[in-house]
């Protein structure tokens, strides 16, 4: 089962909830940190036995002696990553989306695909929790290929928790696609609500069932939970504002160390979600 | 004309609240919200929209069922798994997964795939109580957020030139990827808003590295600095090593969210210590860029 933990607004508690879920649930469990621009889940675990590998994307390389400068590669490229300039074809690696189009259309078979490193994958296991973290190299623009590389490690027989990137654009879509359920974490503020409603529309469009955890309840005079209930949005859990949680978080400590009763609540939420996922799958 | 960008790496450290507050101290100003897929600045500044523009960017493939022979060529060449097999074996393209590369269009032997331009969102030119503002709304799950950022920044520069404004103040997106890079290019200074948490420090280091990669003057402001004094000291030591100057320190204050409800920035809402700290931040920034 794949459970994605997401939120439009940053800093609402995605990583807090993802790491608490990994801690609370029956082992083995996998935690996939797909916030590859700013991965933080590793701060909450012992990662001494970490192994690393590089993440590559394919970019074209032109064999000059076979290239006739016909320009078909530049024509097919929608991203302006290839240009015929004077006596050679220039390749702009940064703009390449690795679609493979140029190689397919080259009549001289002068294009091969070579690896370009854009990030890293780090993997460690502690107490039955396997953490797989993607990390985009600083200066690289495209995070979706790194997110896809992390998600290749999903194991179908166990629970996989995906810690998603913030926002509602393509990194989020890449992180939640194929998830069985999305837990949206919001904070109890106007900003939180505004970004949550965009996320709800995005997840709806992707046809994935979802529920909301309202974090830091009570920080604003006007709670957003009423609004969510009116819109018939499933509220899974409300976590009251607690400076102790923020303090524990600041040092890489778990929310469960501050509020131990949350453990059973999280286990129950996941049990209910998995019943729903199981039923949906048998009806399919 | 100078451009100031507010970023953080980690989300939720207070970029938007601080941007909205700074707006009170700069007299000749154009505001830009570059967090195009989760924009919140408008909630505080209540912009009156003057003009709306469509953001058309890239293309999305679409199979014409009447011409399709289900040969599966598109399915085989798509590197993004965007071609799906429907229940009757018909092929269709999932617009959300489609990268817009057009390879299927070129390869389809029946020419049965269309490639219309995609409407990826809208952007707005507005008036606020602090001056003109350019902001945007990326379409649900759309791509090209970096291009949208470049487009609205380009327009903001034009407005600033025409109206002879001194400063463009930009609320940036979280992360270090494509929309952040598009927000960074060509600005005069970057303010990294961080907080004393291990996560935020980790993320601050990455955004500072990115800003330095582009050779941009970088400053740090510590928000919620009293939630962990020890880590606040860690940040100060760390940025010294990185040769980055501290320009502000703001305490944890629940008045930020209380002000939100009244659609005000904290400096418009209270005269407390936090407001003083932000005023000092504004003065310091002013002295840095002029």
Image (cartoon, rainbow, N blue to C red):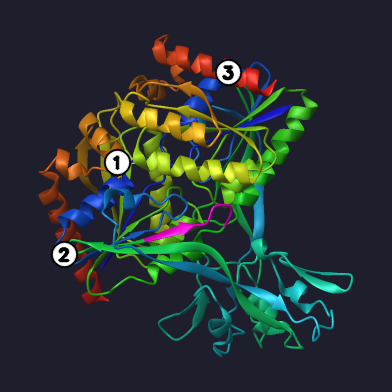
Task: Please state the horizontal and vertical placement of residue A158, each as a whole percent of the image.
Answer: 22, 70
Q: Nearer the viewer, residue A13 or B124?
A: A13
Residue B24 seen in this snapshot:
no
Task: Please state the horizontal and vertical placement of residue B44, each as a whole percent of the image.
Answer: 48, 26
Quarter where residue A69 is shown: bottom right
Q: Nearer the viewer, residue B136 or A131?
A: A131
B121, above or below A175, in the image: above
Mark 2 residue element: loop
User: The numbered mark 2 sits on a residue in which chain?
Assistant: A
User: The numbered mark 1 sits on a residue in which chain?
Assistant: A
Q: Residue at coordinates 23% horizontally, 31% vertically from top-left?
A: A241
Q: Nearer the viewer, residue B202 or A48?
A: A48
- What residue is pinned by disc 1? A228
Residue farthest front in this picture: B241
Q: Viewed as shown, does residue A120 lie left or right of B198?
A: right
The quadrant of the rendering that contains the N terminus of chain A is bottom left
Mark 1 residue element: helix
The quadrant of the rendering that contains the C terminus of chain A is bottom left
3D distance between C-alphas at marks 1 and 3: 41 Å
What span is colored magenta in the figure?
A: A133-141
Discs 1 and 3 share one subunit: no
Q: Residue at coordinates 75% horizontally, 76% vertically from top-left?
A: A73
Q: Viewed as shown, does residue B236 lie left or right of A265?
A: right
- What residue is pinned by disc 2? A27
A58, above or below B24, in the image: below
Residue A23 seen in this snapshot:
yes
- What residue is pinned by disc 3? B284
Quarter where residue B223 is shown: top left
Q: Are marks 2 and 1 in contact (CB under 8 Å)?
A: no
Mark 3 residue element: helix
Q: How crowded is the residue under tag 2: few (<14 C-alpha within 10 Å), some, or many (20+)?
A: some
User: The numbered mark 3 sits on a residue in which chain?
Assistant: B
């Amino acid at each position: 089962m794949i459970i994605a933990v997401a939120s439009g607004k940053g800093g609402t508690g995605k990583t807090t909830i993802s790491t608490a879920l990994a801690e609370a649930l029956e082992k083995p469990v996998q935690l996939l940190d797909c916030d590859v621009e700013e991965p933080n889940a590793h701060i909450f675990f012992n990662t001494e036995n970490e192994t690393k590998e590089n993440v590559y994307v394919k970019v074209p390389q032109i064999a000059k002696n076979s290239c006739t400068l016909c320009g078909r590669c530049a024509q097919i490229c929608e991203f302006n990553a290839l240009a015929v300039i004077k006596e050679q074809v220039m390749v702009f690696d940064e703009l390449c989306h690795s679609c493979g189009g140029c190689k397919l259309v080259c009549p001289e078979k002068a294009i091969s695909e070579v690896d370009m490193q854009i990030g890293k994958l780090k993997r460690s296991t502690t107490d039955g929790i396997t953490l797989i973290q993607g990390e985009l190299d600083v200066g690289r623009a495209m995070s979706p290929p790194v997110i896809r590389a992390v998600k290749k490690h999903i194991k179908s027989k166990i629970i996989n928790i995906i810690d998603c990137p913030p926002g509602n654009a393509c990194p989020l879509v890449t992180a939640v696609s194929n998830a069985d359920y999305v837990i949206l974490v919001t904070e109890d503020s106007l900003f939180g609500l505004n970004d949550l409603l965009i996320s709800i529309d995005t997840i709806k469009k992707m046809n994935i069932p979802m529920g909301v955890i309202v974090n830091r309840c009570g920080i604003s005079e006007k709670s957003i939970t009423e609004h969510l209930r009116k819109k018939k949005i499933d509220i899974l859990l409300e976590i009251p504002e607690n400076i102790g949680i923020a303090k524990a978080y600041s040092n890489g400590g778990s929310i469960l160390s501050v509020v131990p009763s949350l453990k059973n609540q999280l286990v129950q939420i996941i049990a209910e979600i998995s019943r729903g996922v199981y039923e949906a799958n048998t009806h399919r | 004309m100078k451009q100031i960008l507010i970023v953080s790496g980690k989300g939720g450290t207070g970029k938007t609240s601080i941007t909205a507050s700074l707006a009170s101290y700069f007299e000749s100003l154009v505001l830009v919200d570059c967090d195009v897929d989760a924009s919140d600045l408008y909630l505080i500044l209540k912009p009156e929209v003057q003009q709306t523009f469509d953001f058309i960017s890239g293309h999305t493939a679409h199979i014409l069922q009447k011409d399709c022979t289900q040969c599966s060529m598109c399915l085989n060449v798509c590197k993004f798994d965007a071609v799906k097999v429907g229940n009757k074996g018909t092929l269709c393209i999932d617009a959300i997964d489609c990268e817009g590369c057009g390879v299927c269009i070129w390869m389809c032997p029946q020419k049965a795939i269309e490639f219309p331009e995609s409407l990826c969102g809208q952007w707005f030119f507005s008036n606020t109580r602090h001056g003109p503002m350019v902001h945007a709304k990326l379409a649900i799950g759309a791509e090209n957020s970096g291009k949208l950022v470049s487009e609205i920044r380009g327009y903001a520069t034009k407005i600033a030139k025409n109206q002879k404004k001194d400063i463009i103040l930009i609320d940036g997106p979280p992360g270090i990827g494509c929309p952040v890079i598009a927000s960074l290019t060509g600005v005069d200074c970057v303010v990294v808003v961080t907080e004393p948490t291990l996560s935020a420090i980790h993320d601050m280091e990455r955004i500072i590295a990115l800003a330095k990669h582009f050779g941009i003057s970088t400053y740090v402001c510590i928000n919620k600095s009293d939630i962990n004094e020890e880590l606040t000291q860690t940040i100060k030591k760390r940025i010294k090593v990185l040769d980055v100057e501290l320009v502000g320190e703001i305490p944890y204050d629940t008045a930020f969210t209380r002000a939100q409800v009244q659609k005000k920035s904290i400096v418009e809402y209270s005269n407390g210590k936090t407001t003083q700290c932000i005023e000092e931040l504004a003065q310091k920034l002013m002295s840095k860029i002029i």
